[in-house]
Image (spheres, rainbow, N blue to C red):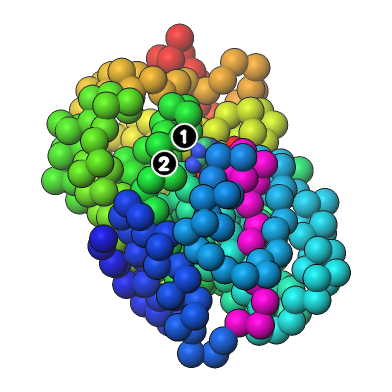
Amino acid sequence: MLQVNIQTSTKSYPVHIGKGAIQQLRDIIHGAEDSYTSIMVITDETVAQHHLDSFHEHTALEGIIEKIVPSGEQAKTFDVYKDCLSSALENKLDRKSLIISFGGGAVGDLAGFVAATYMRGIRFIQVPTTILAHDSAVGGKVAVNHPLGKNMVGAFHQPDAVVYDLDYLKTLPEHEVRSGFAEVIKHSLISDENFYYWLREEIQSLDKMNDSQLLEFLTKGIQVKGSVVAEDERETGIRAFLNFGHTLGHAIEAEAGYGKVTHGEAVAIGMLFSLQLSSQLLGLDFNREAFKIWLKNLGYETSIPAGLANEQLIERMKQDKKAVNNTIRFVLLEKIGVPALIEIEEKVLMMNLKKFVEEGE
Ligand SMILES: NC(=O)c1ccc[n+]([C@@H]2O[C@H](COP(=O)([O-])OP(=O)(O)OC[C@H]3O[C@@H](n4cnc5c(N)ncnc54)[C@H](O)[C@@H]3O)[C@@H](O)[C@H]2O)c1
Ligand SMILES: O=C(O)C(=O)C[C@@H](O)[C@H](O)[C@H](O)COP(=O)(O)O
Ligand SMILES: [Zn+2]
């Protein structure tokens, strides 16, 4: 079992990571300095079906209130958010109650936002069950979606702990492994070329990753995220680098309809596009073709889904949270491990989108 400590300006907390980590949850809860009065676990239908019984068995927590929400992006809606608040009120959660998020990034973002806003904020613990959630469970960004934009209503609210049991990942379908692995690639590209080349060398197929590779890249990803969040919890500066690939990625997710393209698959396309911009605008020296072939071999789509118009994507990107005064800002790379936040003129963006679409055909 490994432990990574996350230290932000508002809170320090541990991430316990490894097979069987769930066994620690009971001790973490019972060992809390200020004890919890009641516990509500928020999970989704799929995770509940696969793992809720064993969650109860391993944690042996009494009187736990269950809230089961729809799976995937359907969880991150205003209606589901309100429904969770209603359940919390009906079950008399108070300011010393605990919310446990048991699931992937969608459940984590939703449950975290419920915890951030219920009675102006109560404590929560993240129990992630996807590869992607090595990213989402750490750092305290919690949110729901708005039809006009991804994660548009949210907060910064750090968990008390993250308990990441890698045994849960065994039931993940391959497209969800692919989605999560995109954020691992992101963490490598923004931080360290050794990490990136190590991944490219080691991971040639997503269904043949072994436990030690998994533990190694998830831990590295969490360390990268933790070090960025430690410096800039509320994204006044370098935290924006964690958004590499997301400006176009979020636009694709919203424009296609939430849940149609997984978050990580949209981010992978967004990273390829950002790398094209980086070569053109910052002179990045990077073998994009080799990167694209690797992505394709791992089963990623490398072009923007058919039917999404460039003009509409640009409109979406203007609403990105990094945009200032209607000016779109992208995270680009000067070198692997050296990201920069750069304003991009609309006409430059349009020209590059056209080129990207043509080259993808
Ligand atoms: N807050 C952050 O910092 C942050 C970071 C990255 C992504 N995100 C958000 O996270 C979301 C994506 O996360 P995700 O990919 O984990 O999504 P998710 O929670 O939607 O999970 C993906 C799918 O896998 C299923 N699933 C989850 N665990 C499973 C398991 N162990 N076995 C089988 N099926 C399982 C879910 O039911 C769902 O259908 C997006 O909404 C994205 O915006 C947030
Ligand atoms: O933690 C961050 O900061 C990130 O940007 C991580 C991203 O992977 C994640 O998708 C995040 O939810 C995006 O945040 P947003 O502020 O662009 O909605
Ligand atoms: Zn992301």
In the rendered view, tell whether residue 239 sits above or below residue 32.
Answer: above
Which residue is found at the position 67% from the left and 77% from the top?
A: 38
Q: Which mark is residue 169?
A: 2
Give the magenta range.
36-48
In the rendered image, the residue lying farthest to the bottom is 34
Residue 66, x across and y down, in percent = 70, 58
Label 2: how many residues lie within 10 Å, few (<14), some (14-19) or many (20+)? Answer: some
User: Does 44 lie within the magenta span?
Assistant: yes
Q: Is mark 1 within 8 Å of ligand 1?
A: yes
Identify the residue position indicated by label 1 in the image: 172
Q: Quadrant of residue 289?
A: top left
Which residue is found at the position 52% from the left and 56% from the top?
A: 57
Give the quarter of the figure containing the C terminus: top left
Q: Foreground: 195 or 314?
A: 195
In the rendered view, tell whether residue 4 sits above or below residue 256.
Answer: below
Amino acid at circle 2: Leu
Which residue is found at the position 32% from the left and 40% from the top?
A: 185
Q: Foreground: 235 or 210?
A: 210
